[in-house]
Amino acid sequence: MEVNPPKQEHLLALKVMRLTKPTLFTNIPVTCEEKDLPGDLFNQLMRDDPSTVNGAEILMLGEMLTLPQNFGNIFLGETFSSYISVHNDSNQVVKDILVKADLQTSSQRLNLSASNAAVAELKPDCCIDDVIHHEVKEIGTHILVCAVSYTTQSGEKMYFRKFFKFQVLKPLDVKTKFYNAETDEVFLEAQIQNITTSPMFMEKVSLEPSIMYNVAELNSVNQAGECVTTFGSRAYLQPMDTRQYLYCLKPKKEFAEKAGIIKGVTVIGKLDIVWKTNLGERGRLQTSQLQRMAPGYGDVRLSLEAIPDTVNLEEPFHITCKITNCRSSVSSSIKMGLLPTHNTHRHIPVICSYWIFVECNEESHALHLNWAVAHTEHFKF
Amino acid sequence: MENAEGASQHVPEQSAPAQGPAQSIAPQGPQGDQGQLLYHEETIDLGGDEFESEDSNNFADKLDEPLMESVLISDSPNNSEDDAGDLGCLHDVGDPAEGSGDHRLGPSAEEGALGSLSDGGESDGGDTPQDVSDMTPDGRASLKEDPERSDVEDLPAFEHGGGEDPGPGAARVPMAGPPSGTPPRQPAPKDEPVPMCTIFSQPPPSAQPPALRDGFESQMVKSPSFSSASEAAPRTPPQVVQPSPSLSKFFGDPTGSSSLASDFFDSFTTSTFISVSNPNASPSIPESLSSLAASPVGGSSPGSEETASSPGVQRSGSGVSTVPLEISQSPKPFSQIQAVFAGSEDPFATALSMSEMDRRSDAWIPGDATRNVLTSVATQQYGTVFVDKEDLTMPGLKFDNIQGDAVKDLMLRFLGEKAAAKRQVLTASSVEQSFVGLKQLILWFVRLALLVKLGLFQNAEMEFEPFGNLDQPDLYYEYYPHVYPGRRGSMVPFSMRILHAELQQYLGNPQESLDRLHRVKAVCSKILANLEQGLAEDGTTSSIAQENRQASVQLWRSRLGRVTCSMANCLLLMKDYVLAVDAYRAVVQFHPEQEPQVLSCIGRIFLQIGDIKAAEKYFQDVEKVTQKLDGLQGKTMVLMNRAFLHLGQNNFAEAHRFFTEILRVDPSNAVANNNAAVCLLYLGRLKDSLRQLEAMAQRDPRQHLHESVLFNLTTMYELESSRSLQKKQALLEAVASTEGDCFNTHCLKLA
């Protein structure tokens, strides 16, 4: 490849324009009433303006599309589209034109050109057009490298490149919280904040659970047979708005029963988010695998399956407990009982709370306790 | 392969076990810092680490230059010629960069997930579903292998640092990279509510040429917005919202013709009229200047234009200095004005008697303070009515020759004097000096409305200022019982109230607009309620014939509709889409005939937000409504909406098909033509797009050289070739013959 003398005029010109979605033209309505001095003049003026809505000129939002006016922002998960035009500015026919568009990110280099075949010839005032698309998957600096090589009439091989640099920004901020229920359920609260500068329509926010869990989305309620979102009529997020999504994860049966599997750091799943902005400009992101630390239960885990809120004095009542041996070794003795939460020296306590205490290690099994409480009016946990 | 991602991916692995034991007992405790930590670790830059040789630093420097400044990149020496100069070096450097990219790609591909990502990137045509299916199985597959390892190893590139917090403490999920990704120079946000080429972009106020001095100069000094005014004014009657000779300035002749504007006005008003309604004319100039010099604000030179530039400051000064003067004299307009109108042939005088229609349309409900003043006036205790001058309206022209002719300026610059001489804009001399000319231009409302039309919002605001909230006593007919015997209501046209409210949103205060619109709406609702209770509009008991009452209800309902529509527009500017949609839906109640248009508009709002489903629903409603109407308009609307829907679904080809369909039934539809051309560009057919726009513009320039079309044309010229200037100049010539002085030259992108 030969080195061109500096400042040489190239016969071809390369132009690049980012194709964000077009916008709708907005006009400024100025009206008056017939009785006012201008009479119908203002209204007539607005009727004649092609950018107003025919028949309802007061509406500000017209139907006229205008091309994007600046590069704008580009966010992770969106699609970067660009028009690449190579125009023959000279008055001679140029041959063997090869246009190559690469995108250099911090980790890789991608070829975005639709075709890598050379164009045989380009007549004066004609152009080669290409529209490239790329779904942006990395944050930070991106450089669009456009290279053009061609042969002049005199057979000279020419080559030039242009670099277009842009920054990919983060569109969303996601915060998560886990709640462990007494049962094996896990509740995930995800706060999604729009950190772009434009409103964002959340088309889909779903949790893809890992193989251990089934998920129930708790972001809609059933109202008169219809599924209504809990976010009301506001289907979009304004800049800096945060929305909270709630999910309930239940371990699948095969994992729930096997003690010890859901222990330590477990993978819950990942959030899949699809949003849209101006005229359906689409973006999509997934979070990394969400992990949670399963609560440690020690050697033995006791969970209450059923228990009455209050019981009457001197009447038998039932408590169903589940005791799980979380240790790998088998132990046989179980000792169980009730202790008042505080030592009372009164002979007849009126209201009293009790701890259930367990000392044991055994395979998981349910106990049916049958106690009658004497000398107490209420029995409360 | 020790790059940033590698490092950050290891973090969760290390920190998770560390937390394990601590949390097995009490799984609470703040974990936020772990997330933070991760967050900071992920730095990606194309700097030193990437390019290891010395030369590569140069390359990196080069890249740091903001090459992509706007959508369209012109051949600046920075990124074209110079690059070509260094080409050899650059190329050499570029290749190591590529090499290192590949190098890093290799190992990460072994991990699986990153490989799948890059696959997606290459085969990608904007089709994500396929891409996702690539990713999900990855995550699962690895989970099957070994739960202990899977959580760390196979994160796709943009998922790095997936450490999640086991406890209930909130943690950041670093879905994306570091904040360091913020660009050194941010491109302007793309979602400006209004395109730049509308008249929203205002010329800087400093660009106004200095006001010409003529006989009415003093009026600028004496407006209540300026300190000097309050000192000289007490001896003079307050101004009435009447045609004022000072309006002649509106015809401001840029060339500074020697003829005084007053000459022109004299031709159709009597001289006595002038002396009363514009009493501040020449005789009082010296006085006002001297008082100005003595005023506490002081320092300001006698040049009245200078005081005009800072009304706020001046006013605060005036409050102190004028008090003693005002107590002694309250304005006494009555007898004088009556004298003026007695026997006058003035066309306005003939319209003064209160008619049914006047009552209907002038009705307004004054605020409490104003009502008290008006009541005192009505009870004829004139001597006891003291009206603070601040409460009266003293409008005045703040600017003369405010705008010039931007088109002509450009023509002079690019096309030469000869071409520019052909440019004709209406000036004072071209306005008919008859009642018709007067009718078109004379009222304040018209002037202010035109200022808004011209996009001179700041000027309009300054001239609106003396009118306050349009509720001062002297804006009511009742204030002048001798001049307008028996007449009630406000002299402020309803449209002026709307304009007054709407103006603020163009100045960046949409909240103020909304407040004012709400006040207008409240009065409209009150008047309607009064009418329904059998009262007159203003709540008094009077007998109104049934048909007149009907007409009144109709008028006020349509006004309520107008103000509701303005509120919807304002909410749209504020990007409060939910309320905007509600307001637009309310408009349909008042203007049922506009239902399809309004529903389409709501659909477009949803498209703008990105809610395609809701947009589709509204567009379907439009189709139902328009089934009843046949004819071109309904058909066009339906086709237009379908095209927009395809646009929202990223299907430019189908959108183009529907826009073209409209052109088949309505070949002169400028919107469909423009939109079809825009679609062609997105389909990679620049030349076709240009041809379509140009053809239409040539056939009917008046209709099709709209500024949005011109903006699109010039944008495409810039994309097409480096010689776009010539074509733009040709456009300028075409525009010069059709457009008036409210034309926004920005859309030609010549400057």
Image (cartoon, grey):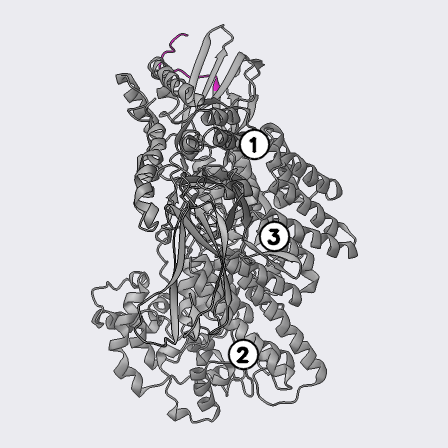
Q: Quadrant of residue B661?
A: top right
Q: Nearer the viewer, mark 1 or mark 2?
A: 1
Q: Which is nearer the eye, A260 or B58?
A: A260
Quarter of the image where the C terminus of chain A is located: bottom left
Label 3 to label 1, Cα distance in Å?
44 Å
- Where is B533 relative to B97, above or below? below
- Where is B490 relative to B571, above or below? below
- Provide the residue designation for mark 2: B364
Residue B599 percent across, percent down from the top left: 65, 56
Residue B728 percent across, percent down from the top left: 51, 34
Is residue B323 rendered to the left or right of residue B482? left
Residue B240 percent across, percent down from the top left: 45, 77
> Which subunit holds the residue at mark 1?
B
- Checking the image for residue B697, the label placed there is none
Query: What residue appears at the point 53 percent right and 70 percent down from the top-left corner?
Result: B268
- Checking the image for residue A52, the label placed there is 3
Would residue B708 be visible to someone looking at this image? no
Label 3 to label 2, Cα distance in Å?
31 Å
- Kind of residue at disc 3: Thr
Q: Which is nearer the eye, B598 or B551?
A: B598
Query: What residue appears at the point 58 percent right and 45 percent down from the top-left corner?
Result: B738
Query: What residue appears at the point 51 percent right and 66 percent down from the top-left corner?
Result: A317
- Provide the residue designation for mark 1: B133
Look at the image and give the residue range highlighted in magenta. A1-12
Q: Secondary structure at mark 1?
A: helix
Answer with mark 1 or mark 2, whichever residue precedes in sequence. Answer: 1
Same chain for labels 3 and 2? Say yes or no: no
